[in-house]
Image (cartoon, grey):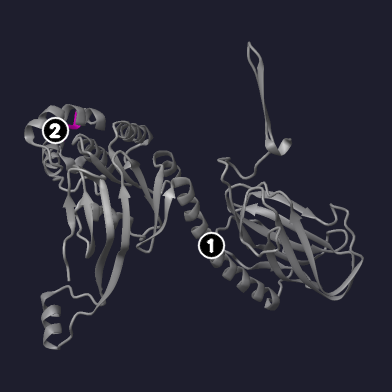
Amino acid sequence: MFHQQREIKKDGDAIVVENVSKRFRIPHERRRTVYENVSGLVKGNKYSYEEFWALQNISFTVKRGETLGIIGENGSGKSTLLKVIAGVLYPDRGKVTVNGKIAPFLELGVGFQPELTADENVYIYGSIMGLDRVTIKKKIDFIFEFAELEKFRNAKLKNFSSGMYARLAFSTAISTDPEIILIDEALAVGDESFQRKCFEKINEFRKNEKTIIFVSHGLGTVKQLCERSILLSHGKINSIGYSEKVVNDYHVGIYAKEELKIKAQQEKINEDAKEVTIAPEPNQPTIEPVTTEQKPVNRWGSQEIKILEVNFFDKTGTERFFFKTGETLTVQLKYYAKKAIENPTFGVAIFSADGTYVYGSNTRVDHLSFGIIEGEGIITLTYDNLNLLNGTFFLDIAIYDEIAVATYDYIKHNYSFKVQDDTGNEGICKMSHTYTIVKSRGSYEYIDPEHQ
């Protein structure tokens, strides 16, 4: 049974959400015409629906003057939750208590009329946001100045770009002087300069102790603006607390899902590697950029020694496909030699997702001698300090003869792992470094901890 539960009070916390659930019904068929609807009724074919709970038993409190972040994957319920708090949607269960005037920055520009001028639209949109005509008249110069659209006041809105459209809506919305502000990715409007103005305005709201709920996929911005955050997953609260912890919980969940996906791909590749017929070695093999979704089986060699499996482990011996910068990565190669072969060369090369050659080594360069090998065996290569930064990295795995000329087996770009860097460094790899600053009075030296 549907029932609305939303209260507005004048004291207490700014927002209290108690056991809120929101349900949508998804039809299994689509009837677009009157004939299809009448025909369905005559035949006795009733509409069939699937219940989808966008929110399930959501409870939290937002204090006055607090900026609360809400994060989660697409479809996790973030926008639905904000609409329930704003009163745009009503919960099917539970209740929301609001203390103060709300300005929802949800779908900027709802209510704009393309055939009217920008000036006329500000009066319409301002009225929707709760401003009377006298107040809008006092604020309208500021609205156009903030939006940087003074020259376009008398232009019809249908001639505006999407960025101009959003800037005008945002500027009008912030002029309502709300006590509670709901922001759903609204800070992504306009160019970089205008986005900075938006952030400055939000910081001004924070200094004036406005209550803000901030939904964003920009996790760095969430950590910067919000002391506390909520992580939603499939309509439920997965984590709530300090933003640093909640963002970390989000990353852990994402990595776990990605790791399962990569693991399934790698297991299939390992199975295929045991069965594949290897092509003759090409005259000029090329290295093409690849993505996680695009993993061509590109392999050649005489197959006198064959690669059976490639696996990745951390320092505890746990199989993993996600690593953090600085961790230990071990690459394990299982091989099979059809006959006795003396001192073959094993090599591993690492490439970034765009095909950049990051690093490569082989047993010949490292002066490692195996003697004679025959049958199955394992060789491991360990990177004690993985100095790679954020990204997906692909491996070329190769086995050559003793002088690294004849190719026994070469697999290009089939195996991959991911790296997450939490230090804020940029690029492909981290390099140890030092700073020395000489001033008129004294000097200062920074030494990278890895150098000490």
Q: Residue 256 carries which label?
A: 1
Q: Would residue 128 be found to the left or right of residue 145 on screen?
A: left
Q: In the image, is residue 153 part of the stretch drawn in magenta?
A: yes
Q: Which residue is drawn at 59% across and 42% down?
A: 427
Q: Would residue 30 be found to the left or right of residue 269 on screen?
A: left
- Residue type (three-letter) at the residue carrying disc 1: Ala
Q: Can you tell which quarter of the image residue 410 is in?
A: bottom right
Q: Give the range drawn in magenta.
A: 151-155
Q: Can residue 244 be seen in this view?
A: yes
- The dominant secondary structure in magenta is loop
Q: Which of marks 1 and 2 is nearer the N terminus?
A: 2
Q: Residue 373: horizontal and vertical position, in percent?
A: 88, 70
Residue situated furthest front in the rendering: 12
Position of the N terminus by quadrant = bottom left
Query: For this rendering, which residue is in front, 210 or 71?
Result: 210
Query: For this rendering, which residue is in front, 388 or 69?
Result: 69
Q: Residue at x 22, y 39 (%)?
A: 179
- Residue type (three-letter) at the residue carrying disc 2: Asn
Q: Would residue 358 be found to the left or right of residue 72 on screen?
A: right
Position of the C terminus by quadrant = top right
Q: Would residue 261 be found to the left or right of residue 298 on screen?
A: left
Q: Which residue is drawn at 16% across and 61% down?
A: 4
Q: Which residue is drawn at 56% across and 45% down?
A: 422
The answer to whether residue 445 is above or below residue 392 is: above
Q: Residue 21: horizontal and vertical position, in percent?
A: 27, 64
Q: Residue 190: horizontal and vertical position, in percent?
A: 32, 38
